[in-house]
């Protein structure tokens, strides 16, 4: 029996998460799936006209919507207004144009850092709108929360199948390793690389006590494909390692040091903010669907990312 061809358009397909999905799709190809990975150079999705043109060109049946203005704690704190406005425009354009072009399924990307600041732990999928997000990244957070509002609205009024996933902190090849703008893990990888090269102590920003659940982009890619192919709910699903796998920033720094075989001194710059102390997320919904899913051990995933960074230093986003 001939199976219907799926044309899967990935907005933000050239970034960390998009490239993780690309690797996962290459490892587990399906004959009826064609993937198109977009960058901002293909279309600036803050423009509705540009969004329409790229949909007109590719006529996708499915969309994985990743494009976003993304940044670490310090980048967000400096530019909450821009994070809000840019992400609101991108999300509104991508979802409305998807509906206009009859896209069957859209999987968008939320984040655990958009959850209420004052909450009980572990956080789960039902708690997204239960209170204000942390003040450091309220622009990004409110814009992301509106994706869930849009998904429900489109599904109710247009019978679409739009949903969202909620990853915890992602790391892996193709990340943004910029020290000022990037997230904590790529920042540590870049710093340790430099410290090893220059034989200098490693300065970790903050006390090192904040805790995070990290997910390797290749594991996230495998889970994204499962959501695209199998998951039928409108309600978002958290894609994360277990609560027991949450680690401190200090442990993350030590694992990165091991990843580079760096044995120098560690200094904690406590004048820098730790951000939210923790945001422990429950992956029990995911585990109900996929009890056997195996995450890559974090030391292995960090070592592989350190190696990728060393090999791609000249081309990486630094
Ligand atoms: P990256 O910064 O690595 O990639 C962002 C992607 O979005 C790039 O392909 C970029 O294109 C594209 N993009 C940015 N602005 C625009 C624009 N105006 N028009 C079109 N495309 C644009 O981000 P990640 O891969 O880390 O993030 C992907 C998704 O995952 C985002 O929605 C993010 O919120 C979410 N997420 C990420 C987490 C993380 O830890 N990184 C955690 C949880 C969620 P170009 O390459 O041309 O700049």
Image (tube, rainbow, N blue to C red):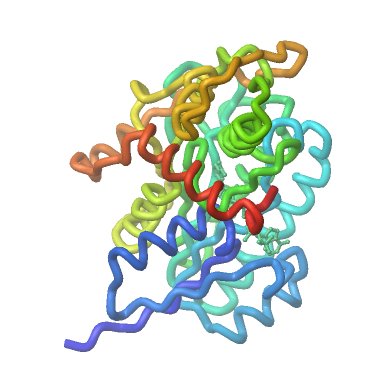
**Residue 75, quarter of the rendered image:** top right
The part of the image, by quadrant, that contains residue 135 is top right
Residue 108: % across, % down: 52, 55
Where on the image, by quarter, is ligand 1? bottom right
How many numbered marks does the figure carry?
0
Residue 86 is left or right of residue 278, and the answer is: right
Q: Give the quarter of the figure containing the N terminus.
A: bottom left
Task: Give 198 or 40, whichever is nearer the viewer.
Answer: 198
Residue 255 at x, y percent in the picture: 45, 27
Q: Is residue 226 above or below residue 120?
A: below
Q: Is residue 264 above or below residue 85?
A: above
Instruction: Give the left or right position of residue 168, taking residue 298 as reference.
Output: right
| Residue 42, placed above or below residue 280 | below
Residue at the spot x=75%, y=77% of the render? 49
Note whether residue 204 is visible: no
Q: Position of residue 152 (x, y in %)?
A: 51, 53
Q: Where 182 falls versus 67 (above or below)?
A: above
Does residue 219 appear in the picture of this structure?
Answer: yes
Q: Residue furthest left?
A: 1
Identity of the residue drawn at 37% across and 24% down: 243
Q: Position of residue 128 (x, y in %)?
A: 53, 34
- Compared across the picture, whether 23 is left or right of 79 comes to left
Query: What residue appears at the point 30 percent right and 71 percent down from the top-left corner?
Result: 29
| Residue at left offset 44%, top offset 78% | 7
Comparing 152 with 305, the one in front is: 305
């Amino acid at each position: 029996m001939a199976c219907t061809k799926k044309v899967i358009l990935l907005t933000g397909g050239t970034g960390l998460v998009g490239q993780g999905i690309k690797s996962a799709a290459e490892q587990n190809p399906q004959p009826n799936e064609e993937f198109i990975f977009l960058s901002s150079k293909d279309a600036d999705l803050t423009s509705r006209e540009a969004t329409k043109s790229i949909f007109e060109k590719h006529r996708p049946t499915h969309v994985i919507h990743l494009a976003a203005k993304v940044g670490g704690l310090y980048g967000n704190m400096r530019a909450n207004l821009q994070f809000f406005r840019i992400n609101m425009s991108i999300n509104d354009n991508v979802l409305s144009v998807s509906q206009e072009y009859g896209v069957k399924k859209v999987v968008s990307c939320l984040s655990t850092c958009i959850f209420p600041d004052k909450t009980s732990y572990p956080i789960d999928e039902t708690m997204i709108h239960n209170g204000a997000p942390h003040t450091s990244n309220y622009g990004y957070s409110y814009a992301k929360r509106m994706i869930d509002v849009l998904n429900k609205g489109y599904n109710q009024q247009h019978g679409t199948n739009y949903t969202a996933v909620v990853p915890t902190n992602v790391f892996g090849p193709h990340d943004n390793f910029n020290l000022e703008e990037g997230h904590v893990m790529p920042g540590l990888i870049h710093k340790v690389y430099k410290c090893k090269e220059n034989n200098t102590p490693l300065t970790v920003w903050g006390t090192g006590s904040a805790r995070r659940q990290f997910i390797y982009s290749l594991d996230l890619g495998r889970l994204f494909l499962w959501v695209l192919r199998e998951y039928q709910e409108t309600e978002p699903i958290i894609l994360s390692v277990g609560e027991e796998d949450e680690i401190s920033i200090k442990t993350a720094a030590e694992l990165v040091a091991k990843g580079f075989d760096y044995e120098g001194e560690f200094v904690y710059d406590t004048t820098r903010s730790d951000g939210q102390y923790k945001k422990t997320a429950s992956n029990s919904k995911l585990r109900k669907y996929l009890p056997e899913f195996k995450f890559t051990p974090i030391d292995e995933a960090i070592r592989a990312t350190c190696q990728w960074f060393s090999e791609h230093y000249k081309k990486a986003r630094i």
